[in-house]
Image (tube, grey):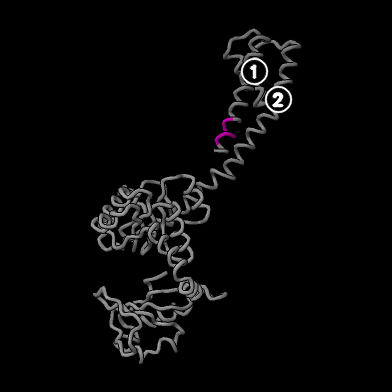
Amino acid sequence: MESYRKFNFVVTILIALILTGTIGYKILLNVNVVDALYMTIITISTVGYAEVATMDVKAKLFTIFIIFLSLGTVGYVFTSIVSSFLEGDLKDAWRRRRMESHVTKLKDHYIICGAGETGYNAIKQFKKSNVPFIVIEKEEEIINRLIGEKIYAIQGDATEENMLNKARIQYAKGLISSLPKDADNVYTVLTARQMNKNLYIVSRAINKNADERLKKAGANNTISPNEIGGHRMAALMLRPTVIAFLDMITHAGDVTLDLEDVVICEKSIILNKSLQEVKIPEKTGLIVLAIKKNNSEKISFNPSSDEILEMGDTMVVLGTEEQVIHLRKIGNDIGERY
């Protein structure tokens, strides 16, 4: 908006200068409008072609006035245009061009639809986790801010197929729909599911009955920020010690502990072995909190040491990022995460 006002101001000054010169020469030299405009342009530009009429003293003094006035005006116009391109438009265009070239290579990435308050908090978490993702957002101001933060972002409506195609949904791993209206979230989820059957989709649910509609549309999970916020507030009031403990174990001083999931893949050295045999806590320092067996929705909390780790099983562990990376190498869960 600021650059737009500045551009209008510069154009107004230039037009005023040309009009002043044209009217002045028409009166002083008694020539037609075209010849007066011609005289004005060659004077302002300092090209120096022959005059269209005999220059008397008044015309010469007027020309001197126009030259001095144009030196400052044209210089200001030129520097304003150059600085506008270098500081704003050109820089933004270069950033967008560079970003677009990277977007065309995205694979196994995540798509975040909507960068409002909920979406932006998701963006911060994805950025912290250093995973590849791209944002689809309508508002140009938000897009410019995200690009300024070196975040891949494209402007448009996430409910449209062409925008999801630009975000390379066919190659994506997951999608978050955090649009401000339930109807838009339902339509985005439905479109995304049709375009990629294997996509893992999480959607924001605003109204009470939106959860069911979103899951019917194809969402794997839904989140209600209002419901979560209410639960958190009640828990802080009713069980403050428990919440303080949970906060402590995920922010233990200077060391941040994260809950992560690690999949047991083919050729893993711990495949078909029990937890007692692999000694994960001793070898990695991680705490195994739960195990989700392959092809089962059931999660086994505080698993027994006799639990056998099979291909496709997922372990939920607590520890540092370095410890999790070590376990992923052991579990052969490489190339699945970033």
Q: Quadrant of residue 286?
A: bottom left
Identity of the amino acid at label 1? Thr
Q: CA distance from mark 1 to mark 2?
A: 11 Å
Q: Is residue 214 left or right of residue 86?
A: left
Identity of the amino acid at label 2? Leu
Residue 139 in view in this figure: yes
Q: Is residue 4 above or below residue 112?
A: above
Q: In this rendered view, identify the residue nearer to me: 237 or 245.
A: 237
Residue numbers of the magenta segment: 4-8
Q: Alpha-carbon neighbours of circle 2 within 10 Å: few (<14), some, or many (≥20)?
A: few
Q: In this rendered view, identify the residue nearer to me: 255 or 160.
A: 255
Instruction: Tell me the element at label 1.
Output: helix
Please say if the residues under marks 1 and 2 sit with CB atoms less than 8 Å apart. yes
Q: What residue is rendered at 47% in x and 50% in y?
A: 97
Q: Which residue lies under the disc numbered 1?
A: 20
Instruction: Tell me the element at label 2.
Output: helix
Q: In this rendered view, identify the residue nearer to me: 44 or 270.
A: 270
Q: Which residue lies under the disc numbered 2?
A: 69
Q: Alpha-carbon neighbours of circle 1 within 10 Å: few (<14), some, or many (≥20)?
A: some
Q: Is residue 323 left or right of residue 55?
A: left
Q: In this rendered view, identify the residue nearer to me: 123 or 44.
A: 123
Q: Is residue 151 above or below residue 281?
A: above
Q: Is residue 268 above or below residue 68?
A: below
Residue 87 place in picture, x, y as percent? 59, 45
Q: Is residue 182 left or right of residue 282?
A: left
Was residue 324 drawn as part of the magenta stretch in this picture?
A: no
Q: Earlier in the sequence, mark 1 or mark 2?
A: 1
Q: What residue is rendered at 48% in x and 74% in y?
A: 241
